[in-house]
Image (cartoon, rainbow, N blue to C red):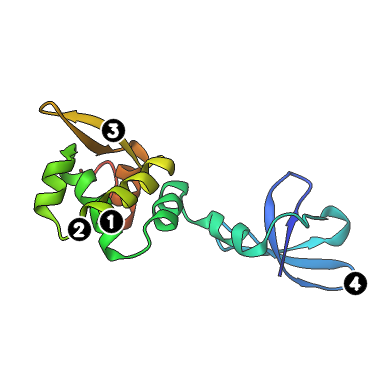
Amino acid sequence: MRTVRDEDGNRLLLVKQSAESSRVRDPETGAERYVENDQLTELDEEAPLSTAALGVPEAVRDVVSAAHDERSLGLLVELADDGPLSVVELLDAYELCESDLHGLLAEFRAAGLIAEADVAGRRGYEATDTTKQAVELLRGETADDA
């Protein structure tokens, strides 16, 4: 499988190629169609699996990429649901040692998933809009459900 671009500038996955046409898949919808080969440009610099991931909303891709396990995903969910929370609250409430917590918080800040917040005069963190949106999408919620 390879990544290609059609004449309209859409990134697609090349599923199968014959002499005159190719079957391509839209990564966002999964829909397949045939396109003439001369209407496609191969994108060597784009990995097909990265293109396939475009079918997942960006906020979800960001969270899935940063959350290495259920514990780290749970921390993001807690911050989205109950945040902002102070570092002291996080250490008291969850089974994370201080170094593990600070490591996760640093990764999440670098990924733009959390932001520093003042919580009753203490340093704390809150989920960004990206994280809140991703949690809603992962739960199958929409803005109308909330």
Q: Position of residue 127 (x, y in %)?
A: 28, 40
Residue at 88% over, 56% down: 38
What is the C-alpha distance between the residues marked 1 and 4? Answer: 55 Å
Which of 34/13 is in front? 13
Residue at 24% over, 37% down: 125
Q: Which residue is mark 2?
A: 96
Q: Nearer the viewer, mark 3 or mark 2?
A: 2
Disc 1 vs disc 4: Cβ atoms closer than 8 Å? no
Disc 4 vs disc 3: Cβ atoms closer than 8 Å? no
Q: Which residue is mark 3?
A: 116
Q: Nearer the viewer, mark 1 or mark 4?
A: 1
What is the C-alpha distance between the residues marked 1 and 2? Answer: 6 Å
Above or below: residue 83 compared with residue 43 = above
Q: Secondary structure at mark 1?
A: helix
Crowd band around label 4 with a 10 angstrom C-alpha radius: few (<14), some (14–19), many (20+): few
Which of 104/50 is in front? 104
Q: Quadrant of the C terminus?
A: top left
What is the C-alpha distance between the residues marked 2 and 4? Answer: 58 Å
> Would residue 145 be seen by someone viewing this image from the given angle?
no
| Label at residue 100 | 1
Q: Secondary structure at mark 2?
A: loop
Q: Secondary structure at mark 4?
A: loop
Between discs 4 and 3, the one toward the N terminus: 4
Between discs 1 and 4, the one toward the N terminus: 4
Above or below: residue 85 compared with residue 76 = above
Which of 45/93 is in front? 93
Q: Is residue 29 left or right of residue 125?
A: right
Number of numbered labels in the structure image: 4
Between discs 2 and 4, the one toward the N terminus: 4
